[in-house]
Image (spheres, rainbow, N blue to C red):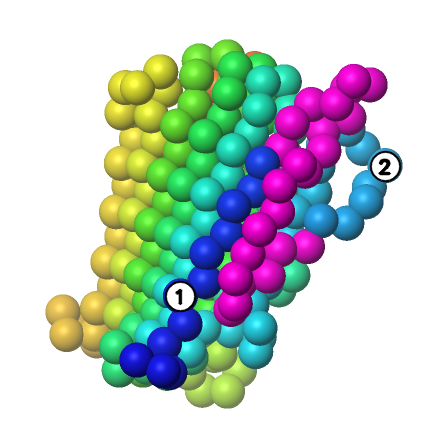
Amino acid sequence: DATAAHGRGELTVVRGREGQSVVTRAYSTSPLRLLTPKNHGSAAWIYTSSYGGGLVDGDRIELDLDIGPGAAAFVSTQASTKVYRSSRGASTELHARISPGGLLALVPDPVVCFADARYKQIQSFDLSADSGLVVVDWVSSGRHASGERWAFHEYVARVRAEVDGKAILHDALALRRDDGDLQDRLDRFDVLAMVMILGKPLRERSAEVVRTVAEIPVR
């Protein structure tokens, strides 16, 4: 189909001689774009984007990310992931491998599905017990300022994580209009989010986050 785009990307981050993490491979095809700006920290920074500012009908993006031993990477987006109205839908897949001593922080802006959009997202992570992973995965109600609140047709997301080959997390979310009116079902909420912190290097930090969240009253 001439109107469908299959973008593919490959990223490799390694630890340099002076402890600075560097991107040694950054390959992408349209509609995926990869930006690797310089920074003053020790981690490599990578921002993903798409030509046209969003995903249109039939778009499909796959990204493979490899974090080498002792390397660290911060991966985010230039802006929210906009998914436009579509009949066939759009999809993204991310597969990440984090070697021992490596750290990946995947902190994108939220997914924003426009009215009548269809979107599927799959993320999988393979890490060792000695590597670290931080993931923020969130979707907003859409362009509610324009009257489009939970007005998309379908949003499906899956997250899977393995540590030393053992599956420790499988999270699945499916929001479909065919299953009932989304505005009624989601009531007053405008964002659904999941935060995942894994690995021995982050054990104390994750416990601190849990304690802090437990002390916040639910409003």
Q: Residue at x 66, y 36 (%)?
A: 24
Residue in the foreground of this view, choosing between 8 and 144: 8
Helix, strand or loop: magenta stretch:
strand
31 displayed left or right of 56: right
- Tag 2–tag 1 contact (CB < 8 Å): no
18 relative to 32, above or below: above
Label 2, on which residue? Answer: 40
Answer few, some or many: residues within 10 Å of disc 1's Cα (few below 14, many 20 plus, some between 14 and 19): some
29 relative to 40, above or below: below
Q: Residue at x 35, y 56 (%)?
A: 121
Q: Residue at x 28, y 41 (%)?
A: 171
Task: Tell me which amino acid carries mark 2.
Answer: His
Labels 2, 1: front one: 1
123 relative to 154, above or below: above
Q: Is residue 32 on the magenta stretch?
A: yes
**Going from the N terminus, do you reach mark 2 or mark 1 first?**
1
